[in-house]
Image (tube, rainbow, N blue to C red):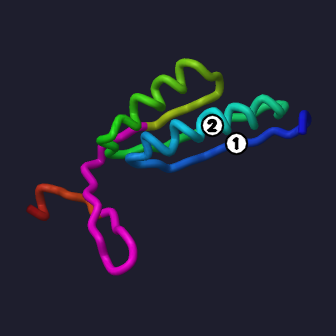
């Protein structure tokens, strides 16, 4: 696998516990590659997810984190969960 170049992308929210377990797995995979980049988009997490990504970004090269608070609320709808923007116009 040494000649492979990859980009690992993820969109996350409130995934503190799960992503803590995944980071070592991702880093082990990256160690076998010629080059890699990790791009993570995070929004509105309230469980410490942002802190995990900030630390990962400091410790690893080519890890890019975009973190935004967009004021989305989770709304249960049928079997799934919908993200709904909360704005002053709706309140």
Percent of width and height locating residue 75: 27, 67
Residue 7: image tag: 1
Q: Residues within 10 Å of mark 1 (few under 14, many from 20)?
A: few
Q: Where is 56 relative to 72, above or below?
A: above
Q: Which residue is mark 2?
A: 38
**In the displayed structure, does residue 40 sit left or right of residue 31?**
left
In this view of the protein, which residue sits in the foreground, 81 or 24? 24
Q: Secondary structure at mark 2?
A: strand
**Residue 70 on the magenta span:** yes
Residue furthest bottom as drawn: 78
Residue 21: image tag: none
The quadrant in which residue 81 appears is bottom left
**In the displayed structure, does residue 62 sit left or right of residue 70?**
right
Q: Residue at x 45, y 41 (%)?
A: 17
Q: Where is 62 relative to 18, above or below?
A: above
The overriding secondary structure of the stretch rendered in magenta is strand
Percent of width and height locating residue 67: 41, 37
Q: Residue at x 68, y 32 (%)?
A: 27
- Label 2–label 1 contact, CB within 8 A: yes
Quarter of the figure with the C terminus: bottom left
Count of residue discs: 2
**Residue 40 on the magenta span:** no
In this view of the protein, which residue sits in the foreground, 26 or 72? 26
In this view of the protein, which residue sits in the foreground, 76 or 35? 76
- In three-dimensional space, the C-alpha distance between marks 2 and 1, rounded to whole angstroms, equals 6 Å
**Which span is picked out in magenta?**
67-83
Residue furthest left as drawn: 91
Q: Where is 20 relative to 75, above or below?
A: above
């Amino acid at each position: 696998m040494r000649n492979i170049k990859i980009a690992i992308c993820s969109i996350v929210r409130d995934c503190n516990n799960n992503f803590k377990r995944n980071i070592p797995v991702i880093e082990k995979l990256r160690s076998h590659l010629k080059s890699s980049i990790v791009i993570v988009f995070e929004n509105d997490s309230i469980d410490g997810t942002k802190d995990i990504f900030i630390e990962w970004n400091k410790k690893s090269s080519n890890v890019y984190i975009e973190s935004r608070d967009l004021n989305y609320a989770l709304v249960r709808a049928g079997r799934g969960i919908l993200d709904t923007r909360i704005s002053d116009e709706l309140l």
